[in-house]
Image (tube, grey):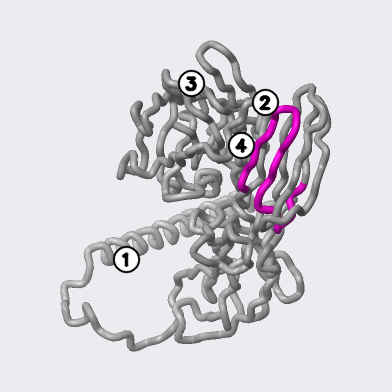
Amino acid sequence: MADTALVALISALVFAGAIALIAIALSWRRKRRRARGNPNPAGDYAPRAAWAPTSGKLNFSSFVYMDVDGDGTYGQADRPMAGIVVRLYDERGTFLASARSNAAGFANFPMSSKRRSAAIQRPGVYRFSVSVPPGWRASSANQDQTVRLRDAPGAMVGLVGEALPKPVGLAPGRTLNGRTPVATGVTLSIMGKGQLLENRALPADAAFRFPLGVDADEIVIAGSGLDRRLKLSCYPVDLGLLVSGALSPGAALKAIGFDDITPRGLCKVPSGHAGLDWRNLNAMARDHTPNSEGYVNGNVSGAYIAYTSSGHPAEFGRDAPFGFHSVMLTVAWLASEGETALVESWLGDEAVARDEIVLSALAPVQYAPMLQAVTRVRLSTKHHWQMVLDDLVLAL
């Protein structure tokens, strides 16, 4: 009996193996036939006759954008956001899948009535939920949306939505960070459209961190020789250590970008760009490197950013002193969220400033030391992850 069972088992295995080999051979023949193509030209451009669903998949997408102007509507001032998590639920509230938005701002969920691997396979009501980062706000107020999908026998994947989810706008929570020297009598004024919104006394010899309301568009610091004025962007601000002799509000400033260095996707920033010497900084198109959230989200103008090559320290400067007003700083990857940047500035051999700035891959921090005269600036990160730069503002 044992011998008979063993022979039966071996026969079954041989038969199963033969069936598998036949299936592989047939599949190979079909692929070879498709690769070879059809020799008959009659059907090259024939209208489709059978409007049945294909076996393919179609992305059903949720679009997320950085709401630069904060109006809750996707407009010309706004930019797609990368790395934002969107979750998909069915009408019973069962979690189905999650996806991160890509460099174009789309979180994609495959849809197909024939493919079991698709996230969306049947008609019904689906909820798309955008995960709003801590401290941010959904300016469009639609981070949770429901969409009804129905059967569509003639559609490519057999399903169609009544509409796509509406674009979701996100705005970063704005804060003002900085440090004071051993000085007293320093006042911070927060302005909005020329009107005083808030007055604060800054502490002596201490770090400070204040929230900035949506109406704030300018800050003014006065007292103890630390006077300065800064127009606000939509991003958090870090002033670093307040030092005396800051750039005057009337200084002639120049914004240095990296769009005019090369038409290629990537190029080392050459010495002479904007009249400065550069070391270990690369200029790169924002979408040149896949799945790099900070390269996308840290791009605030044009299509190019600069980054610290291989995460190594980088420098820019020249022999003649210049003013260092501000720069937008982002960490390149969500995997390094919270990385710390170190920015050191010198005037000749004298150290002028040394500041640490906590970075995010979701949005830049506007580091604004407003130094009146430097000759060299060094940028590095604590854990050697790449740091992204854009809109470097100098007084040359």
- Quarter of the figure with the C terminus: top left
- Relative to 90, say whether 235 is above or below: above
Q: Which residue is mark 2?
A: 243
- The residue beneath circle 1 is 30
Secondary structure category for the residue under label 1? helix
The crowd level at tag 4 (other Cα within 10 Å; few <14, some 14-19, many 20+) is many
Q: Is residue 83 above or below residue 108?
A: above
Query: Which of the 4 image quarters holds residue 236?
Result: top right
Left or right: residue 271 versus residue 331 is: left
Q: Nearer the viewer, residue 76 or 169?
A: 76
Residue 135: x, y in percent?
74, 51
How many residues crowd around disc 1 within 10 Å: few (fewer than 14), some, or many (20 or more)? few
Magenta part of the protein: which range? 211-231
User: At numbered mark 3, what does the secondary structure look like: helix, strand or loop?
Assistant: strand
Type of amino acid at the residue the image marks with label 2: Val
Query: Real-space Cα distance between discs 4 and 1?
Result: 60 Å
The residue that disc 4 covers is 367
Q: Please tell me the numbered disc located at residue 375.
A: 3
Residue 332 in view of the camera: no
Instruction: Give the crowd class for mark 2: few <14, some 14-19, many >=20 residues within 10 Å.
Output: many
Measuring from the top left, give residue 203's x and y in whole percent.
83, 32
Q: Earlier in the sequence, mark 1 or mark 3?
A: 1
Structural distance between the alpha carbons of marks 3 and 4: 18 Å
What amino acid is labelled 1 in the image? Arg
